[in-house]
Amino acid sequence: MKVATPRETADAERRVALVPDTATKLVAAGLQVSLQAGAGEAAYLTDAMYEKAGVAIVADAASLLRDADAVLKVQPPNLAEVHLLQKGAVLISFLQPATQGDIVRALAVQGVTAFSLELVPRISRAQSMDALSSQASAAGYKAVLMAAERLGKFFPMMMTAAGTVAPARVLVMGAGVAGLQAIATARRLGAVVSAYDVRPAVKEEVKSLGATFVELPLESQEGEGGYAREQSEEFLRKQRELIGEHVVKSDVVITTAAIPGRRAPLLVTGEMVKGMKPGSVVVDLAAESGGNVELTKPGQEIDVDGVLIMGTRNVPSTMPLHASQLYARNVANLLLHLVKDGAINLDFQDEITKGACVTHAGEIVSERAKQLLAAAS
Ligand code: NAD
């Protein structure tokens, strides 16, 4: 069975879906592993490192993809890439089924069996394949470093001969995987951290990281599977009224709030940003799914009366080495879950295989993907 990893073609994507360590694991499982020349370069992984791990280096994407039984990617393929895939080939990638309807339909027409990492069920058996979590962790960590680098203040309290400097105040909104990592990172840098989430269940986790949980007199919005449910406009309006005073007191605000498959909720208004002290920094990790901050411009940094709003896209890609390492492990674990005795062996009774599979035998087979496509159209 031939497993291929092409170079990522999306703009500014520096991650790669195969690293030498995971290649070793796949080779040991009896798979023939190949990589497009230079596919790991942007993540500081040279062709020579892959060759040492038993990977064949192929010069061009077309011959690599045409020949592959399984293809590993980070970003969804573009149409040209889809058209190169063999009928019956397996694809494992982030597929963003909510926004990539054309690609999902093209994969079905091409007869590809495509697995979307966004749809891997979040059950304990699938934790080692949970790329949403591994990449959210990278984003939460990096968001704090981005803010610290741009803030004209120290994060920790400093006692110096020239006097004492107060620590920075950081507010993290949304305490899921990215938010908890942001809290831990900001605490390690010595900031005073508070955090807010609509799921009160995270309160103990927030406190155990040394941060204060902001309690607002609002009812819980805990939905299915430990996620937040979609909130009414009335709820969000009340929330904004109550959270405003915490936002304006903060030197750094990091927003990570999301509802699966929906536009990110609006948490921070332009007025709140204008109320913050000049020199403060807002990092909106939800920039790509609509933004938690009213004035965010995805992919841009903007200055609002001296307050910086960072709408950086694809934050995990700015830490390509470790983000790739974790992502590639998630991908290899999912691939090996689908393989038996060196060949693809799909068991659609299995919750992970069924949950993550988007297209198979010419059809869109995932109910979740169908719902997301319908909601987007
Ligand atoms: P996410 O990226 O969908 O959302 C991020 C956070 O935003 C969530 O904590 C959510 O409650 C919060 N949020 C939504 N609307 C908000 C609002 N208006 N104001 C403030 N916060 C808001 O979630 P995620 O980080 O991918 O995961 C969330 C949870 O899912 C985890 O904390 C965990 O309970 C569960 N999970 C389980 C597993 C597993 O069992 N394998 C793995 C990962 C996550």
Image (cartoon, rainbow, N blue to C red):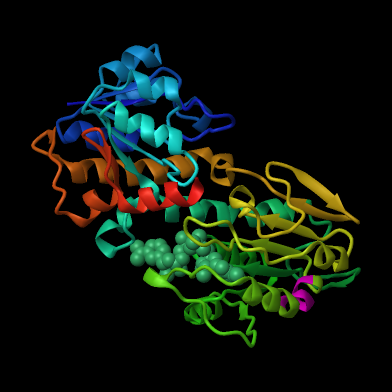
> Measured from the top left, where is residue 33 in percent x and y?
26, 25
Where 153 falls versus 337 (above or below)? below
Magenta-highlighted residues: 243-247
Q: Main secondary structure of the magenta part?
A: helix
Q: Which residue is situated farthest in the bottom direction here?
A: 217
Q: Is residue 8 left or right of residue 332?
A: right
Nearer to me, 368 or 4: 368
Q: Is residue 245 inside the magenta stretch?
A: yes
Residue 46 seen anywhere in this rendered image of the structure: no
Asked if residue 296 is positioned above or below residue 85 in the image, the reply reads below
Q: Nearer the viewer, residue 110 or 186?
A: 110
Q: Residue at x 54, y 45 (%)?
A: 316
Task: Please indicate whether residue 127 sits to the left or right of residue 235 in the image.
Answer: left
Answer with the quarter of the image where residue 246 lies. Answer: bottom right
> At which x and y percent is residue 233?
64, 71
x, y (%) of residue 311?
69, 48
Between 369 and 209, the residue placed more toward the observer is: 369
